[in-house]
Each structure stands twice: as structure tokens, then as C-alpha cells.
């Protein structure tokens, strides 16, 4: 698992963040709490996983922001297919939203 995409995902700055994210697919929509976020995507530790390679629509709002960010995502990581959890990478995140995420991730965290 040392391919370039795996290494790139691991290099991205991550923030532990629990926000509710709406996931939509052909079956409908569901709400999932995130575990962490990076400019590359989300990890959901309590989600019933979709199959790796599945595409979902994502909608979420960062803390302190008013605008809902909407983009497509691809399931890229399911640590245990018999348990909860999946990683979803952003596919078509707009540049303005990527910059918003970068600013959020670089803000000092208050304890």
C-alpha cells in the first residue's frame, strides 16, 4: 500500500473534527459524523461502509462558516469490511472550498 495516492493522503494535514456530513448515493441519503478531515477528504469511523470505489455526493458546513460545501466523493479506504468506518476522498472540490479547508486546517486549535 505504498502507492503515491496512499502516501499523498497521509501527507495531508488532518484535523479531528466531528461534524455531520450528508452522503447521497443511488439509494438515498444518510447523515454521518466525521472523525477527521483533511484537504483530501473525510474519515468516518462510525459509518456503515460503502464499497471501495463507490461515489457519493457530500454536503457539509465547516464550524464558523455559513456556506454549505458540496462535492462528489469516492470511497477509498475501508479498514474492515465487517465493521464500521470508511475514508472518502474529495473528487471535484472547488478551488475556493479547498482554500477554505486549508485555512480552517491551519488555524490554531483552542483546547
Image: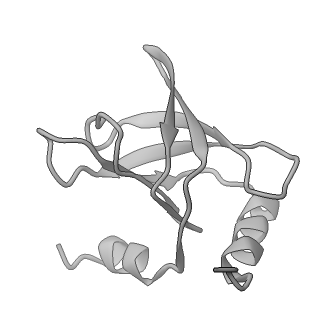
Quarter of the figure that contains the C terminus: bottom right
Above or below for 35 versus 10 = above
Q: Position of residue 24 (x, y in %)?
A: 53, 26
Is residue 98 found left or right of 21 in the rendered image? right
Is residue 26 found left or right of 66 in the rendered image? left
Q: Residue at x 20, y 79 (%)?
A: 2
| 20 or 77: nearer the viewer | 20
Name, please, the residue furthest toward the left.
82
Q: Position of residue 7 (x, y in %)?
A: 33, 80
| 24 or 18: nearer the viewer | 18
Q: Residue at x 26, y 36 (%)?
A: 51
Above or below for 25 versus 95 = above
| 47 or 26: nearer the viewer | 47
Name, please, the residue furthest toward the front.
111
Q: Residue at x 56, y 61 (%)?
A: 17
| 45 or 102: nearer the viewer | 45
Q: Quadrant of residue 11?
A: bottom left
Above or below for 46 versus 104 = above
Amino acid at each position: 500500500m505504498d502507492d503515491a495516492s496512499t502516501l499523498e493522503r497521509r501527507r495531508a494535514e488532518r484535523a479531528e473534527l466531528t461534524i455531520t456530513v450528508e452522503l447521497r448515493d443511488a439509494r438515498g441519503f444518510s447523515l454521518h459524523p466525521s472523525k477527521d478531515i483533511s484537504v483530501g477528504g473525510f474519515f468516518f469511523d462510525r459509518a456503515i461502509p460503502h464499497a471501495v470505489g463507490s461515489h457519493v455526493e457530500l454536503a457539509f458546513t465547516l464550524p464558523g462558516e455559513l456556506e454549505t460545501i458540496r462535492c462528489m466523493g469516492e470511497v477509498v479506504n475501508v479498514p474492515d469490511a465487517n465493521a464500521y468506518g470508511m475514508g472518502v476522498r474529495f473528487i471535484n472540490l472547488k478551488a475556493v472550498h479547498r482554500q477554505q479547508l486549508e485555512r480552517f486546517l491551519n488555524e490554531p486549535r483552542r483546547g
